Structure formats: structure tokens, C-alpha cells
Image (cartoon, grey):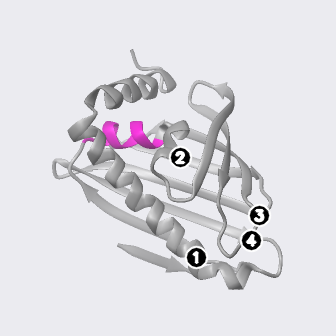
């Protein structure tokens, strides 16, 4: 499911993408929490590196993305925080602290148990800077959808073919949440 909602003072909509996935919430959250793996599967992600860990459940990461239409690369710094929900799920929220192309960017992914599967709901809103914003609305919406599609594929790939990587990521998530 894809939903676009107009945002006041923004040329770009809030984009929400939802999937029902055959995995556990912990498996899905573990893959998303591993920001450094993003270049392996997120479209147009060139690099991602953790700059700092202000607390166990927060990391600050720098991302580099290819931009459409011969624009220079986007380099942005994002604060990412993971927490448990009351329904035995996870919420991972982010906000961009520094960006070339965005005045602000906030998002979150809710990862909840649902009838033996996992409901993943990703929502992201960007207020772009500059006159190019309207021109890039469609590529921005498409990138958000493709990024969530890629996340779902990565979760299922790891679950099926790379359980050792998934187990390592789950340990990292548990450490972030103070679970032993």
C-alpha cells in the first residue's frame, strides 16, 4: 500500500508505505536498524556510516545518495532511534540534522506483529529546499516506495539465505534495546 498526503509548506507529500511480511517483528527491525548495510540494498545509496552512538538505542549516521537528473550527490546526517512498542513491536524514528537538499526530514517505521506475520508501516516527510522541489516530487515518492520494497526484499533474503547475518543483526538490536 502506498499513500501520499500533502504537507503544508512542502512541495513533497508525506509518503506512507505498508507491507505485511512473513517474518517476525524482531527480524524486520534488526535489518532496518543496521544502517551500515543500506548501500547493499537501498536504491541509490552510495554509503552509510555510523558517526556516533549518543546512547545504546540511538545512532547518528551519514548517508550519501545518488540524485536524479545529474544533480550532485546528497550527503545527509540523520539521527536514528529504536524503541519497543506496547504491542511487542518496534518503532524506529529518524530525523535529518544536516542535508543539502532538505530543510527538514522526519520519518518512522512501525513494525508490529499481525496474525503471525509482521505489519511494516514506513512514513517519511521531507520539506525540500530550493526551486527544484516541485520538479523532484515524483522521483522522491518513487524513491521512498522503492526503498521500502528493497527493505522487504532484504528482510526476506536474510531470513531465507543469510540467517547468520540476521542473527548478528538481532544481537545488535537487542544490545540497542538493553535486552540480554
Instruction: Kindly identify the residue that appears in the image at 35 percent across and 29 percent down.
Output: 165
As for residue 123 lying within the magenta part, the answer is no
Q: Earlier in the sequence, mark 2 or mark 3?
A: 2
Depth order, front residue of 81/68: 68
Which of the two discs, 1 and 4, labels the residue nearer the N terminus?
Answer: 4
Q: CA distance from mark 2 to mark 3?
A: 18 Å
What is the number of the mark on residue 128? Answer: 4
Point out which mark residue 139 bears.
1
> What residue does disc 2 label?
39
Disc 4 to disc 2, how far (Cα)? 23 Å
The quarter holding residue 65 reads: bottom right
**Numbered disc 2: secondary structure:** helix
The residue labelled by disc 3 is 72
Q: Are marks 3 and 1 in contact (CB under 8 Å)?
A: no
**Quadrant in the picture for residue 152:** bottom left
Residues drawn in magenta: 24-32
Report the side of 144 relative to 130 (left or right): left
Amino acid at each position: 500500500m502506498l499513500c501520499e498526503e500533502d504537507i503544508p509548506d512542502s512541495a513533497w507529500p508525506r509518503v506512507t508505505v505498508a507491507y505485511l511480511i512473513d517474518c517476525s517483528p524482531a527480524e524486520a527491525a534488526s535489518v532496518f536498524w543496521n544502517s551500515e548495510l543500506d548501500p547493499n540494498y537501498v536504491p541509490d545509496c552510495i554509503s552509510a556510516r555510523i558517526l556516533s552512538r549518543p546512547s545504546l538505542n540511538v545512532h547518528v549516521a551519514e548517508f550519501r545518495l545518488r540524485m536524479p537528473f545529474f544533480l550532485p550527490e546528497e550527503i545527509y546526517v540523520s539521527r536514528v532511534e529504536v524503541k519497543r512498542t506496547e504491542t511487542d513491536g518496534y518503532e524506529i524514528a529518524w530525523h535529518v540534522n544536516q542535508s543539502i537538499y532538505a530543510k527538514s526530514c522526519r520519518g518512522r517505521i512501525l513494525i508490529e506483529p499481525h496474525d503471525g506475520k509482521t505489519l511494516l508501516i514506513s512514513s517519511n516527510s521531507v520539506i525540500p529546499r530550493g526551486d527544484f522541489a516541485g520538479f523532484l516530487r515524483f522521483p522522491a515518492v518513487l524513491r521512498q516506495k522503492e526503498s521500502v520494497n528493497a527493505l522487504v526484499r532484504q528482510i526476506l533474503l536474510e531470513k531465507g539465505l543469510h540467517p547468520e547475518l540476521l542473527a548478528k543483526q538481532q544481537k545488535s538490536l537487542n544490545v540497542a534495546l538493553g535486552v540480554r
